[in-house]
Amino acid sequence: MADKAVPVVEKSLADVKLKELPRWLAGRDLTPNGLVRGVTGGYDWYYKKYINVKKGGIGGISMFLFGYVVISYVWSFDHIKHDRWRKYH
Amino acid sequence: MLSRLVFLSANSLRSSGLIGAGLVQASRSLQTSSQRLAPVPPLPEHGGKVRHGLIPEELFEFLYPKTGVTGPYMLGTGLIVYLLSKELYVINHETIYAICIGTIIVYGVKKYGATVAAFIDSINEEKVAKAQVAKDSHISFLTEAIENEKKEQWRVEGRGMLFDAKRNNVAMLLETNYRERQHMVTNEVKRRLDYQIALQHLNRRLQQEHMINWVEKNVISSITPQQEKESIAKCIADLKVLAKTTQAKAAA
């Protein structure tokens, strides 16, 4: 399967298996500088893949907006909880 | 399409502003792990594929081996049913807003997406064409400069011949000058010698004439009137004799 043994921590997130996720997460650079680099790395990956192209489509920003909508729903769930139709699910 | 607008504005934001500079620097530090490519690789033509505008294609490919084509759709349906039944997603007034706005957005994108995309593409292409024109003019200018340089180098080779010709000219000038001066020298010397000769001739002639005049004058003055009469008579007598002899010769 693997042609050469690479330590789990150095694999990119797409290649990490689900079992190895906690170990991968623990082994990454968690200093503030490392966190900032991680966030900017993620931003750059998304930018390069979906936005920085010659003929981009709607997917690039629609996914971003959808993610924004989901995150704002999650953050306001405690408030929305009170609009539920049934008490027991 | 709209992402292309974002791209335009994001590019300008990146190049200006503090956050942009920080982002560029951060991305540059991430790039130093691999080698930098000298001619910058061109942008990818299309972005990552997204299905229905929301779900990246990678999910479908990830689930295809195990569940076939319908797998992700079943997953989506199951997720939605779960969220609704557990009321993790609550249906309230905002749901109505979301449905209305979603419909409008989807209708707008489907109807006008292509034209907006073409318009933004034309703007981008103008920019690229301008940059290309600048690059081409610069390249042609530089190739011309190279050719001119080569021509100058070729011309330098001819300089040796030019200097030889000039050296010849100078030598000829010196030669002509030298010969002119020689002519002048000979002419001057001859003139001076001629002058001396003329002077001597003149002296001789003057002396001769003066002597002749002086002798004549003395002789004439020495002839007394008496001697003059005698000589004239003698001459007449001689003439008579002569006349007689010639007459006799003529008659004989």
Image (cartoon, coloured by chain):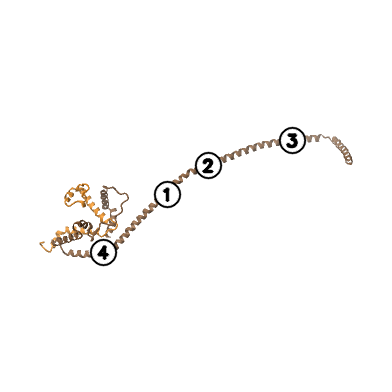
Chain colours: A orange, B brown
Q: Secondary structure at mark 4?
A: helix
Where A70 sits versus B201, above or below? Answer: below
Circle 4 residue: B110
SS of the residue under disc 2: helix
Tell me, yes or no, whether the two marked residues, 3 and 4, touch with CB atoms within 8 Å.
no
Quadrant of res B249:
top right
Quadrant housing the C terminus of chain A = bottom left
Q: Chain of mark 2?
A: B
Of residues B202 and B7, the one drawn nearer to the viewer in this rendering: B7
State the CA–CA distance, disc 2 to disc 3: 60 Å
Residue at position x 47%, y 44% in the image: B159
Tag nearer the camera, 2 or 1: 1
Residue B45's spot in the image, x, y percent? 29, 56
How far apart marks 3 and 4 lie (CA) works out to: 143 Å
- What residue sits right under mark 3 in the picture? B208
Give the class, few, some or many, for how many residues have Cα within 10 Å of label 2's Cα (few <14, many ≥20). Answer: few
Which label's residue is closer to the chain start, 1 or 4? 4
Q: Which residue in the structure is indicated by mark 1?
A: B147
Q: Quadrant of residue A84?
A: bottom left
Compared to residue B141, the image places residue B238 above or below, namely: above
